[in-house]
Image (cartoon, helix red, strand yellow):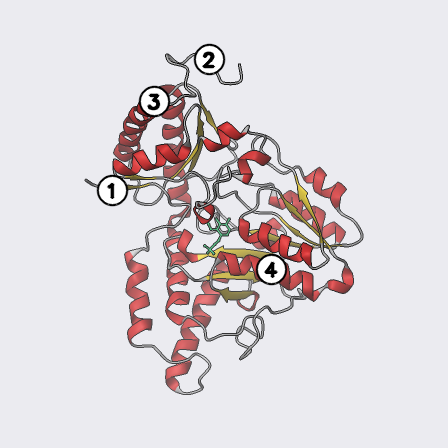
Protein backbone atom coordinates (compact mmCIF):
# COMPACT_ATOMS: atom_id res chain seq x y z
CA UNK A 1 0.00 0.00 0.00
CA UNK A 2 1.33 3.42 -0.96
CA UNK A 3 1.61 5.69 2.06
CA UNK A 4 0.08 9.16 1.88
CA UNK A 5 1.84 11.50 4.28
CA UNK A 6 -0.35 14.42 5.35
CA UNK A 7 1.31 15.55 8.56
CA UNK A 8 3.69 18.17 7.17
CA UNK A 9 3.08 20.50 10.15
CA UNK A 10 4.59 17.85 12.44
CA UNK A 11 7.62 17.46 10.25
CA UNK A 12 8.51 17.41 6.57
CA UNK A 13 10.50 14.80 4.69
CA UNK A 14 14.01 16.05 4.07
CA UNK A 15 14.58 17.31 0.52
CA UNK A 16 17.02 15.09 -1.45
CA UNK A 17 19.07 18.16 -2.40
CA UNK A 18 19.41 19.04 1.28
CA UNK A 19 20.73 15.54 2.01
CA UNK A 20 23.20 15.88 -0.84
CA UNK A 21 24.83 19.06 0.47
CA UNK A 22 24.82 17.79 4.04
CA UNK A 23 26.76 14.66 3.10
CA UNK A 24 29.78 16.74 2.10
CA UNK A 25 29.81 18.33 5.55
CA UNK A 26 29.37 15.01 7.31
CA UNK A 27 32.01 13.16 5.30
CA UNK A 28 34.59 15.68 4.17
CA UNK A 29 34.32 19.09 5.82
CA UNK A 30 34.43 17.76 9.36
CA UNK A 31 36.63 20.40 11.02
CA UNK A 32 35.58 22.17 14.20
CA UNK A 33 34.47 25.63 13.04
CA UNK A 34 36.28 27.17 16.00
CA UNK A 35 39.66 25.71 14.93
CA UNK A 36 41.89 28.17 13.16
CA UNK A 37 43.48 25.66 10.75
CA UNK A 38 42.17 25.22 7.22
CA UNK A 39 39.86 22.31 8.14
CA UNK A 40 38.14 24.48 10.75
CA UNK A 41 38.09 27.57 8.56
CA UNK A 42 36.36 25.71 5.77
CA UNK A 43 33.56 24.66 8.13
CA UNK A 44 33.33 28.18 9.55
CA UNK A 45 33.04 29.64 6.06
CA UNK A 46 30.15 27.29 5.25
CA UNK A 47 28.38 28.26 8.47
CA UNK A 48 28.75 31.98 7.79
CA UNK A 49 27.47 31.57 4.24
CA UNK A 50 24.47 29.65 5.59
CA UNK A 51 23.85 32.33 8.22
CA UNK A 52 23.90 35.03 5.53
CA UNK A 53 21.42 33.19 3.34
CA UNK A 54 18.98 32.53 6.19
CA UNK A 55 19.28 36.13 7.44
CA UNK A 56 18.61 37.57 3.98
CA UNK A 57 15.57 35.34 3.57
CA UNK A 58 13.85 37.02 6.56
CA UNK A 59 15.22 40.51 5.94
CA UNK A 60 17.77 40.33 8.76
CA UNK A 61 21.53 40.81 9.04
CA UNK A 62 23.89 37.85 9.36
CA UNK A 63 25.01 38.74 12.86
CA UNK A 64 21.38 38.72 14.04
CA UNK A 65 20.98 34.93 13.54
CA UNK A 66 21.90 32.45 16.29
CA UNK A 67 21.74 28.75 15.44
CA UNK A 68 19.93 26.51 17.92
CA UNK A 69 18.89 22.87 18.11
CA UNK A 70 15.45 23.75 16.73
CA UNK A 71 12.29 25.70 17.42
CA UNK A 72 11.95 24.60 21.03
CA UNK A 73 15.40 25.86 21.95
CA UNK A 74 14.88 29.09 19.99
CA UNK A 75 11.66 29.75 21.95
CA UNK A 76 13.37 28.94 25.26
CA UNK A 77 16.32 31.19 24.45
CA UNK A 78 14.06 34.06 23.40
CA UNK A 79 11.81 33.96 26.47
CA UNK A 80 14.30 33.06 29.18
CA UNK A 81 17.04 35.11 27.57
CA UNK A 82 14.93 38.30 27.52
CA UNK A 83 13.31 37.66 30.92
CA UNK A 84 16.58 36.93 32.72
CA UNK A 85 18.59 39.49 30.76
CA UNK A 86 16.19 42.36 31.46
CA UNK A 87 14.96 41.60 34.97
CA UNK A 88 15.64 45.17 36.07
CA UNK A 89 13.18 46.50 33.46
CA UNK A 90 10.24 44.47 34.75
CA UNK A 91 8.85 41.01 35.39
CA UNK A 92 5.76 40.88 33.19
CA UNK A 93 5.41 38.81 30.00
CA UNK A 94 2.44 38.76 27.64
CA UNK A 95 1.71 35.75 25.45
CA UNK A 96 -1.40 33.96 24.18
CA UNK A 97 -3.38 30.95 25.28
CA UNK A 98 -2.72 29.13 21.96
CA UNK A 99 1.09 29.11 21.86
CA UNK A 100 3.13 25.98 21.25
CA UNK A 101 4.17 24.15 24.43
CA UNK A 102 7.73 25.40 23.89
CA UNK A 103 6.44 28.88 24.77
CA UNK A 104 3.71 27.95 27.26
CA UNK A 105 5.92 25.64 29.34
CA UNK A 106 8.74 28.21 29.31
CA UNK A 107 6.27 30.81 30.60
CA UNK A 108 5.19 28.42 33.36
CA UNK A 109 8.85 27.92 34.29
CA UNK A 110 9.32 31.70 34.48
CA UNK A 111 6.12 32.09 36.54
CA UNK A 112 7.63 29.78 39.17
CA UNK A 113 10.60 32.13 39.28
CA UNK A 114 8.61 35.26 40.00
CA UNK A 115 7.56 36.42 36.54
CA UNK A 116 3.92 37.35 35.89
CA UNK A 117 2.48 36.08 32.63
CA UNK A 118 -0.69 37.29 30.90
CA UNK A 119 -2.20 34.75 28.49
CA UNK A 120 -4.26 36.70 25.95
CA UNK A 121 -7.52 35.10 24.79
CA UNK A 122 -8.33 34.40 21.13
CA UNK A 123 -11.60 34.56 19.22
CA UNK A 124 -13.44 31.61 17.66
CA UNK A 125 -11.00 31.58 14.74
CA UNK A 126 -7.94 31.61 16.98
CA UNK A 127 -7.13 35.27 16.31
CA UNK A 128 -5.61 37.55 18.94
CA UNK A 129 -7.09 41.05 19.22
CA UNK A 130 -4.29 43.67 19.20
CA UNK A 131 -6.49 45.84 21.45
CA UNK A 132 -6.37 43.14 24.12
CA UNK A 133 -2.59 43.33 23.97
CA UNK A 134 -2.65 47.13 24.24
CA UNK A 135 -4.78 46.86 27.39
CA UNK A 136 -2.58 44.16 28.94
CA UNK A 137 0.67 46.16 28.74
CA UNK A 138 1.91 47.54 32.07
CA UNK A 139 5.06 49.46 33.01
CA UNK A 140 6.52 46.12 34.11
CA UNK A 141 6.08 44.38 30.71
CA UNK A 142 9.42 43.27 29.26
CA UNK A 143 8.36 40.87 26.53
CA UNK A 144 5.45 40.02 24.26
CA UNK A 145 5.56 36.58 22.61
CA UNK A 146 2.87 35.81 20.02
CA UNK A 147 3.16 33.07 17.43
CA UNK A 148 3.12 33.94 13.73
CA UNK A 149 0.80 31.07 12.78
CA UNK A 150 -0.74 28.43 14.97
CA UNK A 151 0.57 24.92 14.42
CA UNK A 152 -2.78 23.21 15.06
CA UNK A 153 -5.39 25.34 13.30
CA UNK A 154 -3.14 27.34 10.96
CA UNK A 155 -4.55 30.76 11.85
CA UNK A 156 -2.10 33.56 11.02
CA UNK A 157 -1.89 36.22 13.73
CA UNK A 158 -1.80 40.00 13.06
CA UNK A 159 1.90 40.22 13.88
CA UNK A 160 2.61 43.49 12.01
CA UNK A 161 -0.20 45.28 13.93
CA UNK A 162 1.09 43.89 17.20
CA UNK A 163 4.64 44.92 16.26
CA UNK A 164 3.53 48.55 15.98
CA UNK A 165 2.08 48.42 19.50
CA UNK A 166 5.18 46.86 21.07
CA UNK A 167 7.47 49.29 19.27
CA UNK A 168 5.46 52.26 20.52
CA UNK A 169 5.59 50.84 24.05
CA UNK A 170 9.32 50.03 23.83
CA UNK A 171 8.79 46.35 24.66
CA UNK A 172 10.65 43.40 23.14
CA UNK A 173 8.52 41.37 20.74
CA UNK A 174 9.14 37.69 19.97
CA UNK A 175 7.28 35.59 17.43
CA UNK A 176 7.41 31.83 17.02
CA UNK A 177 7.56 31.54 13.22
CA UNK A 178 8.31 27.81 13.15
CA UNK A 179 5.22 27.13 11.02
CA UNK A 180 5.65 30.07 8.66
CA UNK A 181 9.32 30.36 7.69
CA UNK A 182 9.62 28.94 4.19
CA UNK A 183 5.84 28.85 3.74
CA UNK A 184 4.70 32.47 3.66
CA UNK A 185 6.82 35.60 3.09
CA UNK A 186 8.59 36.94 6.19
CA UNK A 187 10.38 40.22 6.79
CA UNK A 188 11.39 40.97 10.36
CA UNK A 189 11.14 44.76 9.84
CA UNK A 190 7.72 44.58 8.27
CA UNK A 191 6.54 42.36 11.12
CA UNK A 192 8.19 44.63 13.68
CA UNK A 193 9.64 41.76 15.69
CA UNK A 194 12.84 41.74 17.78
CA UNK A 195 13.12 37.96 18.04
CA UNK A 196 11.87 35.21 15.71
CA UNK A 197 12.10 31.43 16.11
CA UNK A 198 12.72 29.06 13.18
CA UNK A 199 13.08 25.30 12.71
CA UNK A 200 14.55 23.57 9.66
CA UNK A 201 12.54 20.34 9.81
CA UNK A 202 9.32 22.19 9.03
CA UNK A 203 10.66 23.29 5.65
CA UNK A 204 12.26 20.12 4.23
CA UNK A 205 15.48 20.57 6.19
CA UNK A 206 17.03 18.30 8.83
CA UNK A 207 15.66 17.81 12.35
CA UNK A 208 17.58 19.18 15.33
CA UNK A 209 18.56 22.52 13.82
CA UNK A 210 16.88 25.89 13.92
CA UNK A 211 17.63 29.47 14.69
CA UNK A 212 16.67 32.55 16.58
CA UNK A 213 16.70 35.98 14.95
CA UNK A 214 17.77 38.54 17.56
CA UNK A 215 17.50 42.18 16.48
CA UNK A 216 20.79 44.09 16.87
CA UNK A 217 20.93 45.83 20.25
CA UNK A 218 18.61 43.33 22.00
CA UNK A 219 19.77 42.47 25.52
CA UNK A 220 19.59 38.71 25.93
CA UNK A 221 21.11 36.43 28.58
CA UNK A 222 22.66 33.22 27.16
CA UNK A 223 21.10 29.96 28.33
CA UNK A 224 24.05 27.77 27.48
CA UNK A 225 27.47 28.60 28.85
CA UNK A 226 30.69 27.20 27.51
CA UNK A 227 33.06 27.96 24.67
CA UNK A 228 31.34 31.21 23.69
CA UNK A 229 30.25 30.15 20.19
CA UNK A 230 27.57 32.14 18.35
CA UNK A 231 28.97 35.39 19.76
CA UNK A 232 28.53 34.08 23.30
CA UNK A 233 24.78 33.65 22.82
CA UNK A 234 24.75 29.87 22.41
CA UNK A 235 27.83 27.90 23.38
CA UNK A 236 28.49 24.50 21.86
CA UNK A 237 30.28 23.26 18.74
CA UNK A 238 28.17 24.20 15.74
CA UNK A 239 26.32 21.46 13.83
CA UNK A 240 27.92 22.35 10.47
CA UNK A 241 26.15 19.79 8.28
CA UNK A 242 22.71 20.62 9.66
CA UNK A 243 23.32 24.37 9.43
CA UNK A 244 24.32 23.98 5.78
CA UNK A 245 21.25 21.76 5.23
CA UNK A 246 19.01 24.38 6.88
CA UNK A 247 20.36 27.05 4.48
CA UNK A 248 19.85 24.74 1.48
CA UNK A 249 16.23 24.20 2.54
CA UNK A 250 15.83 27.99 2.75
CA UNK A 251 17.38 28.40 -0.71
CA UNK A 252 14.87 25.90 -2.14
CA UNK A 253 11.99 27.61 -0.33
CA UNK A 254 13.09 30.97 -1.69
CA UNK A 255 12.48 29.74 -5.22
CA UNK A 256 9.13 28.11 -4.49
CA UNK A 257 7.34 29.88 -1.62
CA UNK A 258 4.89 31.86 -3.76
CA UNK A 259 3.98 29.11 -6.25
CA UNK A 260 3.78 26.42 -3.57
CA UNK A 261 1.54 28.59 -1.39
CA UNK A 262 -0.83 29.03 -4.31
CA UNK A 263 -0.83 25.32 -5.22
CA UNK A 264 -1.35 24.22 -1.61
CA UNK A 265 -4.10 26.76 -0.96
CA UNK A 266 -6.09 25.29 -3.82
CA UNK A 267 -5.56 21.70 -2.58
CA UNK A 268 -6.37 22.81 0.99
CA UNK A 269 -9.64 24.42 -0.06
CA UNK A 270 -10.58 21.36 -2.15
CA UNK A 271 -10.04 19.16 0.91
CA UNK A 272 -11.95 21.48 3.26
CA UNK A 273 -14.91 21.82 0.87
CA UNK A 274 -14.91 18.05 0.26
CA UNK A 275 -15.00 17.21 3.98
CA UNK A 276 -17.72 19.73 4.81
CA UNK A 277 -19.86 18.66 1.84
CA UNK A 278 -19.44 14.90 2.10
CA UNK A 279 -19.52 14.39 5.86
CA UNK A 280 -22.38 15.67 8.04
CA UNK A 281 -21.68 17.37 11.35
CA UNK A 282 -18.19 18.57 10.57
CA UNK A 283 -16.76 22.01 11.26
CA UNK A 284 -13.66 23.81 10.05
CA UNK A 285 -11.42 24.98 12.89
CA UNK A 286 -9.36 28.14 12.44
CA UNK A 287 -9.91 31.08 10.12
CA UNK A 288 -11.30 30.18 6.67
CA UNK A 289 -8.93 32.59 4.87
CA UNK A 290 -6.28 33.92 7.25
CA UNK A 291 -4.68 30.49 7.59
CA UNK A 292 -1.58 28.62 6.48
CA UNK A 293 -1.81 27.43 2.85
CA UNK A 294 -1.35 23.81 3.90
CA UNK A 295 -3.51 23.51 7.01
CA UNK A 296 -6.86 21.73 7.34
CA UNK A 297 -8.27 21.26 10.83
CA UNK A 298 -11.78 19.91 11.26
CA UNK A 299 -13.95 18.70 14.11
CA UNK A 300 -15.96 15.60 13.30
CA UNK A 301 -18.90 15.18 15.67
CA UNK A 302 -19.69 11.95 17.54
CA UNK A 303 -16.29 10.27 17.16
CA UNK A 304 -12.80 10.77 18.52
CA UNK A 305 -10.04 12.24 16.35
CA UNK A 306 -7.66 9.57 17.57
CA UNK A 307 -9.91 6.76 16.32
CA UNK A 308 -10.08 8.46 12.91
CA UNK A 309 -6.29 8.89 12.89
CA UNK A 310 -5.66 5.20 13.66
CA UNK A 311 -8.18 4.03 11.06
CA UNK A 312 -6.70 6.30 8.40
CA UNK A 313 -3.27 4.94 9.32
CA UNK A 314 -4.53 1.43 8.60
CA UNK A 315 -5.42 2.74 5.13
CA UNK A 316 -1.89 4.15 4.69
CA UNK A 317 -2.79 7.79 5.42
CA UNK A 318 -0.79 9.70 8.07
CA UNK A 319 -2.57 12.66 9.70
CA UNK A 320 -2.65 14.16 13.19
CA UNK A 321 -5.14 15.08 15.88
CA UNK A 322 -3.31 18.29 16.73
CA UNK A 323 0.19 19.09 17.73
CA UNK A 324 2.57 16.15 17.22
CA UNK A 325 4.68 17.35 20.11
CA UNK A 326 1.87 16.69 22.58
CA UNK A 327 0.29 13.64 20.99
CA UNK A 328 0.85 11.59 24.14
CA UNK A 329 -1.49 13.95 26.01
CA UNK A 330 -4.91 12.64 26.89
CA UNK A 331 -6.14 16.21 27.32
CA UNK A 332 -7.94 17.83 24.39
CA UNK A 333 -6.07 20.54 22.52
CA UNK A 334 -5.53 23.70 24.58
CA UNK A 335 -5.76 25.65 21.30
CA UNK A 336 -9.25 24.40 20.43
CA UNK A 337 -10.46 24.90 24.01
CA UNK A 338 -9.10 28.48 23.97
CA UNK A 339 -11.06 29.03 20.74
CA UNK A 340 -14.22 28.11 22.64
CA UNK A 341 -14.83 24.60 21.28
CA UNK A 342 -16.65 22.27 23.66
CA UNK A 343 -14.55 19.34 24.91
CA UNK A 344 -16.34 16.83 22.63
CA UNK A 345 -15.55 18.80 19.48
CA UNK A 346 -11.97 19.35 20.61
CA UNK A 347 -11.60 15.57 21.08
CA UNK A 348 -13.08 15.00 17.63
CA UNK A 349 -10.56 17.15 15.79
CA UNK A 350 -8.30 16.09 12.96
CA UNK A 351 -5.37 18.03 11.50
CA UNK A 352 -4.42 17.29 7.90
CA UNK A 353 -1.41 19.23 6.66
CA UNK A 354 -0.28 19.17 3.05
CA UNK A 355 3.13 19.69 1.49
CA UNK A 356 5.49 19.62 -1.45
CA UNK A 357 4.64 16.05 -2.46
CA UNK A 358 0.85 16.22 -1.99
CA UNK A 359 -1.18 15.75 -5.17
CA UNK A 360 -4.80 16.29 -6.18
CA UNK A 361 -5.49 12.52 -6.62
CA UNK A 362 -4.15 12.01 -3.08
CA UNK A 363 -6.53 14.64 -1.70
CA UNK A 364 -9.45 12.99 -3.52
CA UNK A 365 -8.42 9.57 -2.23
CA UNK A 366 -8.27 10.88 1.34
CA UNK A 367 -11.76 12.33 0.99
CA UNK A 368 -13.13 8.96 -0.07
CA UNK A 369 -11.36 7.03 2.67
CA UNK A 370 -12.22 9.57 5.35
CA UNK A 371 -15.92 9.44 4.47
CA UNK A 372 -15.89 5.65 4.86
CA UNK A 373 -13.89 5.71 8.09
CA UNK A 374 -16.22 8.27 9.67
CA UNK A 375 -19.30 6.27 8.64
CA UNK A 376 -17.76 3.09 10.12
CA UNK A 377 -16.85 4.76 13.40
CA UNK A 378 -20.17 6.58 13.75
CA UNK A 379 -21.99 3.28 13.22
CA UNK A 380 -20.40 1.92 16.40
CA UNK A 381 -20.23 5.18 18.36
CA UNK A 382 -22.59 5.38 21.35
CA UNK A 383 -22.58 9.17 20.87
CA UNK A 384 -23.85 9.09 17.30
CA UNK A 385 -27.51 9.58 16.57
CA UNK A 386 -28.27 6.91 13.99
CA UNK A 387 -29.21 8.49 10.68
CA UNK A 388 -27.37 11.72 11.49
CA UNK A 389 -29.61 14.72 12.00
CA UNK A 390 -29.33 15.91 15.52
CA UNK A 391 -26.34 17.50 17.22
CA UNK A 392 -25.27 16.45 20.68
CA UNK A 393 -26.01 19.85 22.10
CA UNK A 394 -29.59 19.68 21.11
C1 LIG B 1 4.78 26.57 16.43
C2 LIG B 1 5.87 25.64 16.84
N1 LIG B 1 6.82 26.07 17.70
C3 LIG B 1 7.83 25.28 18.09
C4 LIG B 1 7.94 23.99 17.66
C5 LIG B 1 9.08 23.15 18.11
O1 LIG B 1 10.06 23.07 17.10
P1 LIG B 1 11.18 21.90 17.14
O2 LIG B 1 10.46 20.64 16.81
O3 LIG B 1 12.16 22.31 16.10
O4 LIG B 1 11.76 21.92 18.50
C6 LIG B 1 6.97 23.47 16.78
C7 LIG B 1 7.00 22.06 16.35
O5 LIG B 1 5.99 21.44 16.13
C8 LIG B 1 5.92 24.33 16.35
O6 LIG B 1 4.98 23.90 15.51
Q: Is residue 232 placed above or below 193 in the rendered structure?
A: below
Query: What residue did someone put label 3 on?
Result: 380
Q: Quadrant of residue 206?
A: bottom left
Q: Is residue 53 placed above or below 47 in the rendered structure?
A: above
> Sequence order check: which comes first, mark 1 or mark 3?
1
Q: Percent x, y for residue 272?
A: 40, 28
- Point out which mark residue 78 bears: 4
Instruction: Quote the CA–CA distance across marks 1 and 3.
Output: 27 Å
Q: Is residue 100 left or right of residue 114?
A: left
Asked if marks 1 and 4 touch (Cβ < 8 Å), the reply is: no
Q: How many marks?
A: 4
> Sequence order check: which comes first, mark 4 or mark 2?
4
- Point out which mark residue 390 bears: 2
Indicate which label's residue lies in the foreground, 1 or 2: 2
Which residue occupies the foreground of this view, 25 or 54?
A: 25
Indicate which label's residue lies in the foreground, 1 or 3: 3
* Label 4 Cα neighbours within 10 Å, binned few <14 / some 14-19 / many ≥20: many
Q: Secondary structure at mark 1?
A: loop
- Point out which mark residue 3 bears: 1
Q: Percent x, y for residue 320?
A: 39, 40
Amino acid sequence: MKQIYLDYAATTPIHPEVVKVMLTYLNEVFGNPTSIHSCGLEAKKAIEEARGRIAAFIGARSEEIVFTSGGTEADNLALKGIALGNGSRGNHIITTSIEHHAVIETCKFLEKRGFKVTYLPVDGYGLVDPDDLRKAITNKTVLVSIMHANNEVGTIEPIADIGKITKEAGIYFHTDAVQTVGHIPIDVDMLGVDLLSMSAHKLYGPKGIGGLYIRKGTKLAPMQHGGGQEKNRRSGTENTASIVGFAKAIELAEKETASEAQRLTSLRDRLIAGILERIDHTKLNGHPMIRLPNNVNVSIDYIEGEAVLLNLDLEGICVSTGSACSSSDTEPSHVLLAMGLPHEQAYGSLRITLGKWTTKPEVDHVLEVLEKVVAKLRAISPLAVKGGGQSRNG
